[in-house]
Amino acid sequence: MTLTIATWNINSVRLRAELVARLLRDEAPDVLCLQECKSPVDKIPAEVFAELGYGHVVARGQKGYNGVAILSRHPLEDAGHRDFVGKGDARHVAARLGNGLTVHNFYVPAGGDVPDREVNDKFGHKLDFLSEMRDWFTAEPPQRAVLVGDLNIAPLEDDVWSHKQLLKVVSHTPIEVDALEETRAAGAWVDVTRADIPEGKLYSWWSYRAKDWSAADKGRRLDHIWATPDIAGGAHGSKVLRDVRGWEKPSDHAPVLASFTL
């Protein structure tokens, strides 16, 4: 079978429920993982998605902040979540499909504006979150799994509009890039998007601050799809839906998709 998985930081699932519905109609992924839902689970407009055939939902939420959800056309088993750094944030949820595939949906902390944990607690939170992810994957090596989400780090030089200018900007600093690479390597995860699209600039996020985000094109690849080696060889069809960033009242992130032949 072929399974298509999409990930999208929606920046309020209630505010942008119709955009989610449009994506589901246009692209028809088997599974859609959302981050920054900013909603308690019981307030997620699940009925809107169920009408389109996505009646299976596993989610963790909180009012006004964070929040992660997995929508699926296929039955899902709730595979739990982890409370990284003990803050009680809704930043991770996992679900298992009937074929045994586990999908992890992550929303890694953004890290604030100053890349120094001594003066910025948010940056320390981000680094500690990544360390706990790394230690988990080291202790319990994942198998037959996909990890997606807004990881809030653009690791490669071509994942940002200017490597040189962003080296001291949170999301592309060497300490964050190294931390993300250690996390990826701990689980032997394969960066599916870059395995599929190894060359060229590739972004999934553009700031709201730009008057014309597309013309300025100062983007970063913050949203990722990873897979364990036992299924990564079946990955194909990766893409970033840049045009979605131009929809009316959009999220500042664009969806990222990949298909897996399992």
Image: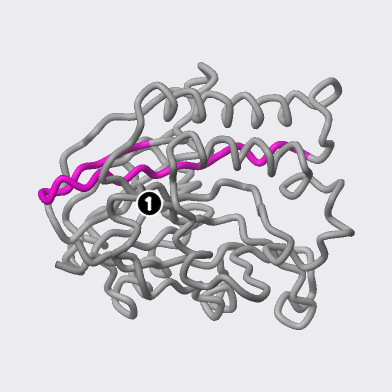
The answer to whether 184 appears left or right of 116 in the picture is: left
Query: In which quarter of the view is residue 213 placed?
Result: bottom right
Category of crowding for the residue at label 1, using alpha-carbon neighbours closer than 10 angstroms: few (below 14), some (14–19), many (at least 20): many
> Is residue 101 shown in magenta?
yes
Of residues 13 and 35, which is closer to you in this image?
Answer: 35
The residue segment tinted magenta is: 93-112
Q: Residue pushed farthest top?
A: 86
Q: Amino acid at mark 1?
A: Ala
Relative to 61, say whether 50 is above or below. Answer: below
> Is residue 29 shown in magenta?
no
Residue bearing the label numbered 1: 227
Relative to 239, say whether 96 is above or below. Answer: above
Residue 97 on image: x %, y %? 17, 48
Q: How many marks?
A: 1
At mark 1, the secondary structure is strand
Residue 236 on image: x %, y %? 36, 71
